[in-house]
Image (spheres, helix red, strand yellow):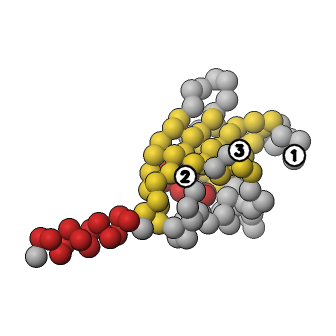
């Protein structure tokens, strides 16, 4: 019976992916790096961020990180942006579903997008 239970548990963990999440707060605060697991195809980049940080999300139609661990976006100056496996995506973090990604980085920076 114990071998059967162990086999079930090992099978469940084999579907979990490991990911490193880095949060770059900017010059006034050290970066944060955490490791976590997720199930492929079941969680968005934004939802995974919420698991490892205190995140405030914008209100309205488009959901994005307005504040991470108390560091707030500032209209027309600074904002939060993310990359997955070192590459920018063409999707909002709330719409980007993770499958086999190994790293995700959130950076607080100036952007011309505002």
**Viewer-side residue, 11 vs 106:** 11
> Which residue is denoted by mark 1 in the rendering?
114
Q: Is residue 5 in sight in this rendering? A: yes
Classify residue 75 by image quadrant. Answer: top right
State the residue lying farthest toward the top: 28
Tell me where residue 48 appears, x and y as whole percent: 53, 56
Residue at coordinates 10% horizontally, 76% vertically from top-left?
Answer: 1
Sequence-wise, which precedes: disc 3 or disc 1? 3
Left or right of residue 9: residue 78? right
Sequence-wise, which precedes: disc 2 or disc 3? 3
**Viewer-side residue, 96 vs 67:** 96
Real-space Cα separation, disc 2 to disc 3, in angstroms: 20 Å
Real-space Cα separation, disc 3 to disc 1, in angstroms: 12 Å
Q: Relative to residue 101, is residue 41 depicted above or below?
A: below
For label 1, the crowd category at 10 Å Cα-Cα, with few meaning under 14, some 14 to 19 and many 20 or more, is few
Q: Secondary structure at mark 2?
A: loop
> Which residue is denoted by mark 3 in the rendering?
80
């Amino acid at each position: 019976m114990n071998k059967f239970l162990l086999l079930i548990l090992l099978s469940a963990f084999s579907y979990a992916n490991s990911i490193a999440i880095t949060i770059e707060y900017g010059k006034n605060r050290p970066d944060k790096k955490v490791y976590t697991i997720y199930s492929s195809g079941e969680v968005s980049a934004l939802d995974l961020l919420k698991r490892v940080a205190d995140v405030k999300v914008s209100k309205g139609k488009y959901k994005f990180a307005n504040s991470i661990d108390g560091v707030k976006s500032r209209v027309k100056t600074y904002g939060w942006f993310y990359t997955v496996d070192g590459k920018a995506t063409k999707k909002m973090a709330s719409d980007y579903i993770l499958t086999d990604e190994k790293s995700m980085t959130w950076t607080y920076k100036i952007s011309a997008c505002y």
